[in-house]
Every structure is written in C-alpha cells, then in structure tokens.
Image (cartoon, rainbow, N blue to C red):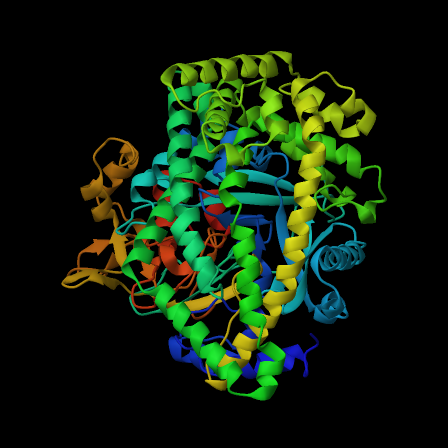
Amino acid sequence: MRLERPLLTCLAALLLTAPASAREGMWTPEQLPDIAPALKDAGLEVPPSTLADVTQHPMSAVISLGGCTASFVSADGLAVTNHHCAYGALQLNSTEERNLIQDGFIAHERSEEIAAGPGSRILVTVAFDDVTSRMTEGLEELDGKARYDAREDRRKAIVAECEEDEGHRCRVASYHGGHHYRLTKQLEIRDVRIVYAPKGSVGRYGGDVDNWQWPRHTGDFAFYRAYVSPDGEPADPAEENVPYRPTSYLEVAPDGVQSGDFVMVLGYPGFTSRHRLAAEIEHTFGWSYPYGVEQMTETLGIIDEATADDPEAAIKYASMVGGINNGLKNRKGMLEGYSKGNMLERKKALESELAAWIEADPDRKARWGDALKELRDLLSEAHADDLRDSLQFGALGSTLYRTASRLHRLAKEQEKPDAERKSGYQERDMRFFRARLERQDRRFDPDVDRALWKDGILEYFTAEPSVRIDVIDSLFGVDPSAGTSTEDESKSLESQVDSALERFYSGTRLDDGEVRLALIDATTEDIESSDDPFLAAVVALYDETMRREVAAEELSGKISSRRPKYMEALLSYLDSLGRSVYPDANSTLRVTFGNVQGYSPRDGSSHLPFTTLQGLLQKDTGEAPFDAPAEVLEAVRDERHGQYGVQGLLHGEKETVPVNFLADLDITGGNSGSAVLDGKGRLVGLAFDGNWESIISDWDFLPQVSRSINVDVRYMLWMMDEIDQVDFLLREMGVEPAP
C-alpha cells in the first residue's frame, strides 16, 4: 500500500515527541537534532547537529568490523576495539607454541604488526541516504516470491550502482520492518593488522563465569591498524601498504568520567526485536530459546570431550566455544528475564489497543483492518516447521558438508549474469567466499567435526519419523526404523552412522585447503561428476534444497508485504499518543546516550558504578578465569597508579584506578568495541557487555536496571603504561606516558 503522505514526514512527526525514556533508544544520526533537548539535559556539550553527519567528527571516527565496532584513535589508522572482538584474529594467529590468546601480543614496530586474517576488514561509513521510494514503489502490487524477487533485484541494483565507486562496500537496510530503507556506503579497508592486545587473563578476565555479570574487572580492549595502498586506496594486504589516514579520530580523555557524568555510545548495534508481535515473543521464548539452550549445551559438551587431549584442536575451536558460551548465557538470561517480567502481557495489551483504535475509525479500518491478523497467520505458518528444519539442519551439520554446499551453489550461480546471482555468490562476495575457505584449516578438526555431526545425525534419526525425508535418509545408508524402539536397535543405528561417517571422512579431499580453493573455479559439471562423498551428497539434495528455498522465499515475500502495513498502523497509533519511536537496531550506525550510574537489582541491594584495581586484587584467586598476571597484581599491591589514580571515586579519599564502569546506555550485540564518549565527545571507555538484567533488552528495555558495562579508559591507559609499557602507542594517541 502506498503511503498517503511522505514517510519521512511521518517519522519526523514521531521523533519530535519527547523520548519515553531519555536512556532508551538506539537513535539514527539524523534523528539526534530532533531530540536535542533530551541530549542537552543529559549533559551533552557539543551541538547535537554535529552528531547528525556521519562524514564529520566524531561520527566519521567510528568504524565497523563487520560484527563489532571500533574507533580510530590516531591519524595513522590506529583503531581500538574490544579484546573479544579481536579474539578470532588472535586465534587465527595462534599455535600451541605461540598462543596469542593466552600471552597477548605487542608489535613494538609497525613492521611487527601481523595480519588479522583472511576476510578481516574495517568499514568506514562515508554516506547514509534514503532509498525508500526506489525500494518500495509498485511493490504493493506484488506478493509472495514475486515480491521477494523484486525487492532483492532492487536492492542488488542499488548496491551495484553504489559500488561502482571502487573500494567501497554498500548495503541497503530496512527500518521498521520494511517501512523505509536507507543505503549505507562504506570505505572497505582490507588490510587490517593486529597492533596490541593484552594477555588473555586481562582481556578475558572473569571469562564466561563473569559474562553479563557485575561487578567486573575485565580489560576488554585491543588495537588494530588499518592499511591502504601507497596512493591511499583500499588494497589487499601487501608489504608496501601504508597506514590509513582517517578524516578524523577520537581524542582520548585520560581524566575519564565520574558518577553522574553524561556518556554516549557510537556504534553498530546488531539487531533488536522490540516491535515484534506477541506471537513472535511466545514462539521465541516458548520454543526457540529453550531449544537453543539444549543444543548449545550439548555442542559445548561434545567439543570439550573431543578436544580434551588435543591442545591444537582446542585452539582451533576456541573462538567457536567462546561464541557459543556467550550465546548460551545470553539465552539463559533472556529466559530468566522473560519469566520475571510481563512483556508478553504488555505486548498483547498493546495489540488489543491498536486493534480497537483501528476499528474505531472507518478510514483506519479500511486501511489497516486486516494487518494484524494477516501477519499473525503468516508467522504461525513460518513457525510450524521449525523443529523439523532444525533437526534436518543438524543431520547435515558437518563443516565439510556446508563447504561442499556453498561450492556447488557457487558453480550453479556462476552460470548466470552477475546481477542475477543470489546474494553471497556475486563477484562482490568472492573475497569473503575465498577468505572463508582459507580460514577453515585454522578452525577445523576432522575428529571434532565428526563428533558434532554424529550427534546431529543421531538426533535426526531418533526423532519422530515425520521430520525425516527419504533423500536425507539415503545419504547415510541407514535403515529409517533403526533406533526407534529397543536398545539393540539404538546400537545398530549408532553403528550404521559410524560406518557412514567413516565413508564420508575417509573419502573426501575437502579437508585440503588447496583442493577447496581450486573448486572455486569448478563448473557445475565438475562438481556433479565428483566422487567426493560430501559433494555427491550435496548434489543428491540439491532439488530438495531448492524446493525449500523457493517455499521460504514465497513466505518471506508475503510477510514482507504485511509487516510494513502493521508497522505503519502501529507508528500512527503511537503518534496519536505522543509516543516517540526509534527503529529496531539493524547493524547500522546508531547513537545511545545516558549517564554513569549504578542500579538496584533487587530490594535492599545496590551496585556502585565503578570497579577498581583494589577490587581486582580482592577478586583474584590465582586460578582461571580469575588469574590476573603476576605483574598486574604486584603493581596493585604496590599502589603504582601512575597518572591514572583517582581519589574519592568510591569510598573515602583513597586513591585507586577505575577498571570498569556502568552507564544506563541502550546497547546490544554489535556494540561490542563501541566508543564511550563524554559530553565533549572524548573517548572515556569502550562498551563490552551488559548486566544480567539487561539481557532481555533485545526485546524489552528496562531503564531502571538495564546497564552497559564499559572498560574505563584509565584502566586501558594504566595497563598500557604501567604494565605493558607500550609508550609508543600512548604517544600516538596523544597521551604522554609516565616518566
């Protein structure tokens, strides 16, 4: 349906209303002038208009790592982010003899800086433009797969036009469920090198035990450097490349912040779901998250057992294990937060109010009367086969099977003109496609992969027969009736699966990096005539895979026509109540703001906003994950605070160095590594986590208890100055080290 008035005019009217909570909201840059009073009341000292332009300081200093955020802090392309954002790069460069995850890394000279790894990139946003009309005009006449295909064709055409400017990466993102669209254009820097990371017992202090917890004492920071060709253009890694000269970089504030001070986070938050329907909440918290907890717990146990006596394999899977642990704790926290709150009831009440408001006016009824019901029906259809799809996905869960699948699909897609290929298989995607294949050797072990796949296959064959299909059953040569009743049958099933796995792993060459890379140029005929068991399996399943893909796109196209209609009704209703609206996070540049402050998690309990070196000393047990380096503990005992000591921060006038601090900032995944700035726009810390009570914030923001956890800049500088003595980096950032 066409809008009766320009979309941006409608959104502007919504944004002129005062924020429901000054702390809630991940605001797009152009929205900030409209909420200037709230920003100034909170303590912002620079004009809000300066934050509205992504090409100007300080916004232009904030960069994306494609999953995390970082910021330039020097004129020579030095960028700071979280240690856990650099974890994968450290893992890729680690061996049993030289474990950078454990020992840290310091490049004392630029010639010692090491490549972050294949596919690493720094994305600098240079433009942010509205493309709503190009994406939506005429779509109201289409539905299902026709709509899906039209939208994809338009998106690819817009991106291709944008990327005619060589060296740039472009993306069309939807806002408010496809209600409007914006094009982000980013300079893509492809030579990214590790400069400095503290030891793992600093960067990951507290490990998974402390994840999402307060108090924290984690030095979650690391440094990259961006390199370009001698003429200043993005280039593949090369010895002759030179440091990138950003248009701006952040000023470091060695004096940090105090309790109550204004702070803001500039970053690229991933995805939130605050405008989802009650039906989606029920499905997510009633099935998806509990099932995910079971699967992640099982996966961690399998990896732990399979790598117990193999340190090299453990290093290869360290990044995966860290990610799964983080996801597992997140899901458990989500479920706990959901059980304690009334989010579902509030969402149902809102939908009832919306329905009544629509029904009360003939024009509204004509326009939106069926929006909510149609969307609910489609979502119910989408959720119906989730268990079946998950079990079948697990049955095909080998890394080598998925590699074979991508290679086969690539050969198929390369038969088409580039503009007609599926996303992920166009020429613009080939660098990442190749990099993924190159990285695989550093993150793959056949014994671990086999153990994980075996678990998925057994779960598939012991589930209800209705989830199985003949084409998958036939891949393994397994009797579908095995393992469904007696213990003997179960043993027989496991034996059959073991035989099938032996056939796959002994007969493949996809575990050879050179073979994988050579297959990038393979034709469909090459793939389909191969006797490699993984490639043969993919070919056998191709027709079924494509049937599922077409059905999914048909349903996606239908949902994409109803959700914007529902969101239009919701936005109009909220507008009538004078309530502000900000888009759900979608991995585009956002700003959130608030103040340094603690919170009360429950009656009679409160948390102060800072932790200190003294608290680190008290917390340390000498055993992982609470095992700070000996030189750190010695410096704390000797009260060697240097120029970073603060008096009266917590209790009395005793001097200390702050380690982490809390603020009521609205953040989520993707904000990791985001710069925390003070009211003058200076760097005072890095966001790296949230408290336990904030986990539910992806769905439901709770301003009284939701807090971001941030590395204090004074702890970063103290660690660099007093412990690791990287004076050259301090001076590069404009900080004079202690004499």
Q: Position of residue 658 (x, y in %)?
A: 29, 54
426 sits to left or right of 370: right
Using the image as rendered, state which of residue 614 and residue 118 is in the foreground.
118
Compared to residue 411, the image places residue 69 above or below, namely below
In-front residue for pair 633/126: 126
**Residue 655: x, y in percent?**
21, 55
Residue at (58% x, 15% y) in the render: 505
For the point 68% across and 83% down, the residue is 4
| Quarter holding residue 362 | bottom right
Q: State the residue in front, 227 or 399.
A: 399
Q: Can residue 70 be seen in this view?
A: no
Q: Where is residue 389 in the image (x, y as percent from the top left)?
A: 54, 40
Q: In this view, does 8 lie to the left or right of 331?
A: right
Which of the 4 quarters of the picture holds residue 416?
A: top right
Position of 1 with respect to 586 (left or right) is right
In the figure, 479 relative to 705: above or below? above
| Label total for image | 0
> Quarter of the image containing the N terminus?
bottom right
Residue 566 percent coordinates (x, y): 57, 71
- Whether residue 314 appears in this view of the structure is yes
Decide: is 52 above or below 511.
below
Question: Compared with residue 241, is residue 66 higher up or lower down, i.e. above or below?
Answer: below
| Left or right of 430, for residue 586 | left
